[in-house]
Structures are given as structure tokens and as C-alpha cells.
Amino acid sequence: MCYYSGGNYFDELELVRHGISTPVQVGECEQEAVEDERGRDGVIETCAYSYEVEGKEYKGGGETIFDSDTVIYLPGYPETHRIKHTMGSSLTDFFLRRVLLGLVLLTLFIAPGFQLLQIGIRAFIKNEEVRDT
């Protein structure tokens, strides 16, 4: 089941392009007390939910969900779904949030490793000791 905002980007792209919306029935909810790094207390409420497609009921859970929310599912695979407020609403939004931001973060985190590798290769070729910079 794919009922979280992360996960398979291909499924999410298909949901944005071809997804069908249906109402959601909110089930049991659980509350968990949390504390942030500043010491402030809060409560996170996650709920189980279900939705119906062609007379068959599908279930999901572990989501912050509202009574007015809807589920978007794939027509051929209704078990592949997302809560509407957790995903982008258009292809542009999908590409900006998922693809472009992902590439920026990937580049940001990989660049220092490539730079260190390049320094090491240059030092090996020149037969010099790597100096702390």
C-alpha cells in the first residue's frame, strides 16, 4: 500500500496524471504526545481511514487526515493511493517539489564527496601527501 507522501515517485506521477478522487471515511484516531527540540509539547493525531471503489473497501492508516479530505487512487490499481492534501495538485507542482528539489538536494550532498575524491586522485597522481585544507 502506498498511503504516505513519500515513496514511489512513479506512482505519485501517475496519481497526478490519472488519479480518481473519492471521499474518505475516517476511522479510529490515535494521539501521541511529542516534544520538539526546544522543549515545547505537542500532540500528533494519526487516523486510520477507508475508501470505497466499485463496492470494495480499501483501508489505509497512519495519516493526519481531515473529514473533508479525499483519496486519489489509480483506476486500475485502487490500492495505490494518496490523501489529496499530501501530494501535489499538478504536474508542475510534482516536478518542482519532487524532481527539481530532489536533484538540488542530491547535488548539495554529493558535491563535497566528489571534491574530496578529486583532491585524493590529484594527490595520488602527483605522489604528494594530502594536506589538510
Image (cartoon, rainbow, N blue to C red):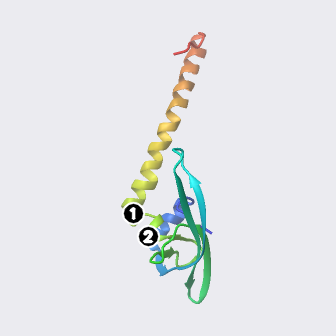
Q: Residues within 10 Å of mark 1 (few under 14, many from 20)?
A: few
Q: Quadrant of residue 121?
A: top right
Residue extending farthest bottom: 55
Measuring 51% from the left and 50% from the top, which residue is drawn there? 40
**Residue behind mark 2:** 17
Q: From where the camera sits, is residue 3 visible?
A: no
Quarter of the image with the N terminus in it: bottom right
The answer to whether residue 52 shows anywhere in this view is yes
Residue drawn at the location 47% of the way across and 37% of the way down: 108
Query: Which of the pair 118/96 is nearer the observer?
Result: 96
- Is the Cβ of the residue at disc 2 closer than 8 Å to that at disc 1? yes
Q: Nearer the viewer, residue 98 or 120?
A: 98
Q: What's the residue type where badge 2 is placed?
A: Arg
Query: Residue 85 location, x and y as percent?
Result: 45, 67
Name the kind of residue labelled 1 in the image.
Leu
| Percent coordinates x, y for residue 7 in the rendering | 57, 59
- Dot 1: element: helix
Q: Position of residue 57 (x, y in %)?
A: 61, 84
* Residue 7 relative to residue 102: left or right: right
What residue is at 57 percent from the left and 15 percent from the top? 123
The residue carrying mark 1 is 91
The image quarter in which residue 117 lies: top right
